[in-house]
């Protein structure tokens, strides 16, 4: 059985505590539970992580590249949070690791402030998903399983 690695970036540990109109009222623990279900129905193991630190996310993407090359990882679903809009380092890490990665956003970033319209992740991602709320995580896992 292959693993799906779900990576969550800065401030996503606050999910469900503020801004429910934008991100909904479910917590990151609820999102993990939803991912457990989605992985189970697609015969994938789940590895679910969150970090507020860019370097830690980069290390995890490198680790994912090695795991995919070894045949144990199906791919990554990455919600890079605000690093989406700032991080050339994450872009380079995804390219360098050669890992299959789906960029995910809970909100429709294109319907929000202009500074959220550009992503450094998108050109390095296999697919991009935004605006489905937290249900997007289950959809992204289904997409990963179907690749
Ligand atoms: O829509 C998304 O998933 C985002 O990646 C979320 C990021 C934001 O910077 C991106 O533009 C879009 C923000 C994550 C922080 O989430 C919070 C949730 C509740 C309270 C405070 C922050």
Image (cartoon, rainbow, N blue to C red):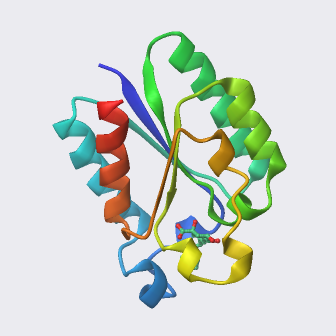
- Work out whether 143 lies above or below 32: above
Is 51 in front, or is 76? 76
Q: Position of residue 104 (x, y in %)?
A: 50, 56
- The quarter of the picture where residue 46 lies is top left
For image coordinates 37% across by 81% down, the residue present is 25
Q: Quadrant of ligand 1?
A: bottom right
Residue 70 visible in image: yes
- Work out whether 18 lies above or below 61: below
Is 58 in front, or is 117? 117
Is 42 positioned to the left or the right of 77 in the image?
Answer: left
Q: Position of residue 75 (x, y in %)?
A: 47, 31
Is 99 in front, or is 127? 127
For image coordinates 21% across by 47% down, the residue present is 37
- The quarter of the picture where residue 116 lies is bottom right
Residue 45 visible in image: no
For image coordinates 68% across by 35% down, the residue present is 94
Which residue is the extreme one toward the top? 70
Is 76 positioned to the left or the right of 133 in the image?
Answer: right
Q: Position of residue 132 (x, y in %)?
A: 36, 68
The C terminus sits in image quarter:
top left
The N terminus sits in image quarter:
top left
Say how many tags the image has. Answer: 0
Q: Position of residue 12 (x, y in %)?
A: 56, 66
- Work out whether 6 lies above or below 120: above
For image coordinates 45% across by 12% down, the residue present is 71
């Amino acid at each position: 059985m292959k693993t799906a690695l779900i990576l969550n970036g800065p401030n996503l540990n606050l999910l469900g505590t503020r801004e429910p109109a934008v991100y909904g009222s479910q917590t990151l623990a609820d999102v993990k539970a939803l991912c457990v279900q989605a992985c189970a129905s697609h015969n994938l193991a789940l590895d679910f992580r969150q970090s507020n630190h860019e370097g830690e996310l980069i290390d995890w993407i490198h680790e994912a590249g090695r795991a995919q090359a070894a045949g144990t990882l199906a791919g990554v679903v990455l919600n890079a949070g605000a690093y989406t809009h700032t991080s050339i380092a994450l872009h380079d890490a995804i390219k360098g690791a050669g890992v299959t990665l789906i960029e995910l956003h809970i909100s429709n970033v294109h319907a929000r402030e202009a500074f959220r319209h550009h992503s450094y992740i998108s050109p390095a991602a296999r697919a991009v998903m935004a605006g489905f709320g937290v249900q997007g995580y289950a959809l992204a896992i289904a997409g990963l399983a179907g690749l």
